[in-house]
Amino acid sequence: MKALQYRTIGRPPEVVEIDTPEPGPGEVRIKVTAAGACHSDSFIMGLNEEQYVYGLPLTLGHEGAGVVDKLGDGVTGVELGEAVAVYGPWGCGRCAQCAQGKENYCERAAELEIRPPGLGAPGAMAEYLVVPDARFLLPLGDLDPVEHVALTDAGLTPYHAIKMSLPKLVPGSTAVVIGAGGLGHVAIQILRALTPATVIALDVSQDKLRLATEVGAHHVFPSDAESATRVKELTGGRGAAAVFDFVAIQPTLDAGHAMLAVEGDQVLVGVGAGALPVGMLTTPYDATVRSPYWGSRAELFEVFDLARSGLVKIETERFTLDEAPEAYRRLHDGTLRGRAVVVP
């Protein structure tokens, strides 16, 4: 079968022919119908040899959807031909966090060397994907796999980040989204669907600011040295009740910190390499800084329901598997408006 693999440190991924995987006991094979390209992939491909820990060659793709194609011995709960989406943050299934469906925070994943698809385990940028347990497959139902595969990360990650801040996003409050691209434009829609907050979007790209307006942002500003001042002016000096940073490089961290209100949440979702000072003289009173990771299985069901109700829609651009290297090049260059989806 064809697969997109990262094979050499510092080189672009390649489309190659590899053996079609067979499901073992308890495993499920799906025929992939859609796979999303994500900045996390670009991030790990930018690591040097000392930092890279994911193994080579690595089949990319942690956002996946497909049709159940073959069942390993003992598998129950899914049927051949069923349309499914893959819950990506795989865990042990037995610890206290996993028991709550929070496999994104599995207590034993590192110890047991459990890696997500495309982030250590073979991913969905291939014609077939083997999933280690049926619990990682959620029914897609009537959702189009190509239009909705990115919900498994680009929807779930901002949903989880926002859900934890909902008590602070009351009438009269303000939420700021820094980075209105692949995850940020979904975050704007989630904020509009779940909260009465005024939503401000910041980005360096005028095209992405236009997208932010299209999906419901009340105000859009360039992400620059003046953005914190603009937010403070717009909020009468109070600042933002929550800042969701989908970039998390030093300039955006500094700006987010400067615009944060007393008791506000600064939520670092991006994988940038910045750092924040925290202390009585530098942090607004009772403010929190959080760095959430992905989301729970239960939350992914909720994200799918938001999509079914028409409240969340992902801007997507389609690529064939042979075109997948180009999708990652454009992702790296920042020329994608929303999400790139590869259709094998």
Image (tube, rainbow, N blue to C red):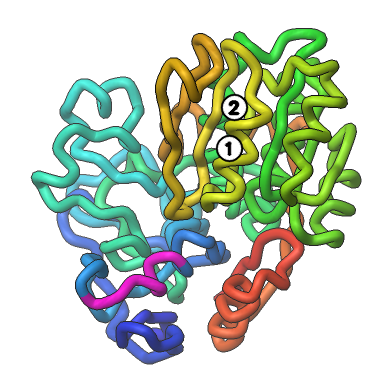
Badge 2 element: helix
Dot 2: within a 10 Å radius of its alpha carbon, few (fewer than 14), some, or many (20 or more) residues?
Answer: many
Q: Is residue 66 left or right of residue 174?
A: left
Would you say residue 31 is visible in this rendering?
A: no
> Does the magenta segment cover residue 45?
yes
Count every numbered label the image shows and give the total: 2
Q: Is residue 31 above or below residue 254?
A: below
Quarter of the image where the N terminus is located: bottom left
Quarter of the image where the C terminus is located: bottom right
Task: List the residue tagged with mark 1.
Answer: 158
Q: Label 1 sits on what residue type?
A: Pro
- Quadrant housing residue 29: bottom left
Q: Label 2 sits on what residue type?
A: Ile
Q: Is residue 183 left or right of residue 152?
A: right
Question: Could you tell me which residue is drawn at 64 percent across and 40 percent down?
Answer: 255
- Quadrant housing residue 80: bottom left
Q: Residue 41's spot in the image, x, y percent?
A: 45, 66
Q: In this view, does 28 lie to the left or right of 289?
A: left
- Quadrant housing residue 49: bottom left
Task: List the residue tagged with mark 2.
Answer: 162
Q: Which of 168 and 315 is in front in this view?
A: 168
Q: In this view, does 234 lie to the left or right of 5?
A: right
Distance between mark 2 and mark 1 Cα atoms: 6 Å
Q: Residue 9's spot in the image, x, y percent?
A: 31, 83
Which residue range is magenta in the image? 43-49
Question: Could you tell me which residue is drawn at 44 percent across and 16 percent down?
Answer: 280
